[in-house]
Image: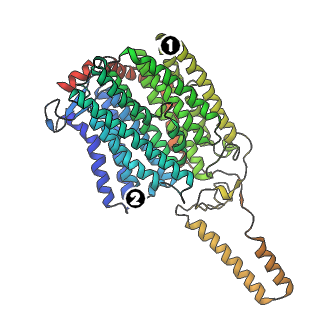
Amino acid sequence: MMPESALTLFVAIPLLTAGLLIAVASRTRLVLTVLFAVLVVQLSAAIATVAWVSDGSVVVHQVALWAPGVAIPFVLDMFSALMLTVTSLLTLTCAAFAVAAGEAFKRFYPPLVLLVTAGVNGALLTGDLFNFFVFVEVMLLPSYGLMIITRSGRASVAGVAASRLYISVNLLASTILLIGVALIYGLTGTVNIAELHGAASENTGVAVATALVLFALAIKAAVVPVHGWLARAYPKMSPAVTAMFSGLHTKIAIYAIYRIYAVIFDGDSRYLWVGVVVFSATMLIGVLGAVGEAAPRSILAFHMVSQIGYILLGVALFGPLGLTAGIFYLLHHMIVKAALFLAIGAIEVRYGPRRLGQLSGLAKTEPLIAVAFFASAMSLAGIPPFSGFVAKLSLIIAALDAGQIVAAAVAVAVSILTLLSMLKIWTGIFLGEPTATDSRTLPEGMNPAYSDAPGIPDGRDLTGSGAADTGTATATAAATTSTAAATAAPTDTAIANATDAAAAGPPDTVMVPPGRRIGLALAAPSLVLAAVTLTLGLGGQLLLELSGTAAANLYDPTGYVQAVLG
C-alpha cells in the first residue's frame, strides 16, 4: 500500500470500528478499551503527519485510484496535519474525562465518538466541497446522539429547547451549505477545490455561490450576528460533550473558511474589509455578552464566540503574518477552551451546576482544578508565559502591519475584558472560604455525604442506586422505629409526637461540609491541556514555524492545486 493511501485510514478505521463496537455495546470494558486504543493510535499517526509534511509538501491520494478531477481527493498539508493532531488530542482527553465523569458508560457513547472522529478527519482531509458537506453531516449526526444519551436525569425544558436549537441551526446551515455547493457545481461543473482555484475572484456568479457557502460556515462557526445559538446551546450539554464540541464543530467550519477563501477566492483583497468588520464585531459582542451571565459555562460560551472573532481575523488580514497568527490562534484556542470547559465541567460533576456566588473557596479544597482553570484562563486572556500571549501578540502585530489599527485596538480592549471575566469566575468560585453545599443542588444520584475529606464516607454510585438505597434504608429504619415505639407505648403523647412528625414533612436539607471531591482522574484532562498551553507559550517558536508553513500553503495555494490536479 502506498503511503498516500494511508490517509483514508483516518476515516476508515474509526468508521469501521464504530460499526463493530455497536455489535458488542453491552461489553463496556472491552468497548472503552478499543475506543482509547483507536484514539491513541490516531493521535500518534496525526503527529507523524506533521513530520511528513514539515517541508511544506502536499500529500494527495485519489481515492480508488481514479484519475484526478474524477476521484475524491484526500489532501494533507501542514494546516490539515496540525488540525488532525489537535482534534485527536482533544477527542482523547475529552473521552478520558467522560470516563471519569461516568458519561462514557452510557450505551453507544464510544461508537458515537468514533463516528464523530471519522467525520472530523474526513472534513479535514477531503479536497472536494460536496464530500466536505458529507463528512460534516457524518460528524453532526452522531453528535445529536451524544447530546441526548449524555443528558443526566430528566430533561429540563431549557435543555430540550437548547438541543432543539442546536439541531435546527445546524440543519439550516447544512441546507444553505448544500445549496451553495450545488450552485458552484452548476456554474463551474466541478466541486473539486483545486479545480476551483481563483474561480470566485474571476466570476461574480461563482463569488456569490461561494459566499453562500461561507455564510453557512459562518453560522456553524457562530460568527456575529448568527452566534446566539452557541451561547444558548453549549451550556445545556453535558460537560464532556461541551468540551469536545468546542474543539471540533466550530473549528471545522473555521478551517473550511480559511481553505475556501485562500483557494477559491485566491485571497481576493476586495472582500477582506467585510471580514475585518464582522470579525471585529464578533470579538467585541462576544465578550460583552459574557458580562451579563452568571453561570460559568455561559460565560465561557460567550467568550468562545469572542475568540472565534480573533481566529477569523487572521483570514481577513490575508497575508503571511495574518494567516500565521490566525492558524496559531486557532490551535491555541482549541486547547485552552476545552481545558476551561473541562475544569468547570469537573466542578459541575461533583458539585452540580452552579452560578457565581453559590460556591466558594475551591482554591483551597480543589487545588488541582484551581491550577488547571487559572492557567487556562490566563492563557485565554493572553497573559504570558502561556500560548494565548503569543497568539494575541502575533495577531495584533499582523493587524498593525496590515494597517488595521481599529481591529488591533479592538483586540487589545477585548483581551482586557476577557481577563476581567476570567477573574470574575475565579473570585466567584475559587476564592474565599470553603462553604458547605446544599445537598439539593448536588448531581442526581450522588450521595450528599460524599467527600474525600477525612472522616466523611464515600457514597459515590454511578447508577445512583447507592444514594437511593441509603435513603430507602433510612426511611425504612425510621418507620420501623416509629412503629415499634407506637406498639410498645400507645400513649396520647406518642400519638401526638407521631402526628407532629408527619405534619413536619421530610427532614431539613442536608448541608454537606466542604472537602475535596474532585479526584485526579477527573482533573487530569484539564491539567494536561493546561500544561500543553504553557508548553506552547514557552516554546511557541516551534508552533509558529509550523503555522507559518501552513500559512505559506494558503497564501500561495499553487502547490496545493498542482498536487491535487497532478
Q: Nearer the viewer, residue 543 or 103?
A: 103
Q: Earlier in the sequence, mark 1 or mark 2?
A: 2
Per the rendering, the mark at residue 404 is 1
Residue identifier under label 2: 29
Residue 203 point in image, percent of width and height: 28, 19
Q: Nearer the viewer, residue 98 or 72?
A: 72
Q: Quadrant of the C terminus?
A: top left
- At a point 59% along the width and 49% down the height, the residue shown is 348
Q: The residue under label 1 is which amino acid type?
A: Gln
Mark 1 to mark 2 CA distance (whole Å): 54 Å
Residue 442 point in image, percent of width and height: 63, 56
Q: Is residue 288 left or right of residue 397?
A: right
The residue carrying pointer 1 sits among few (fewer than 14), some (14 to 19) or many (20 or more) residues within 10 Å by Cα, namely some
Residue 25: which quarter of the image?
bottom left
- Residue 41 visible within the image: no
- At a point 33% along the width and 47% down the height, the residue shown is 38
Q: Secondary structure at mark 1?
A: loop
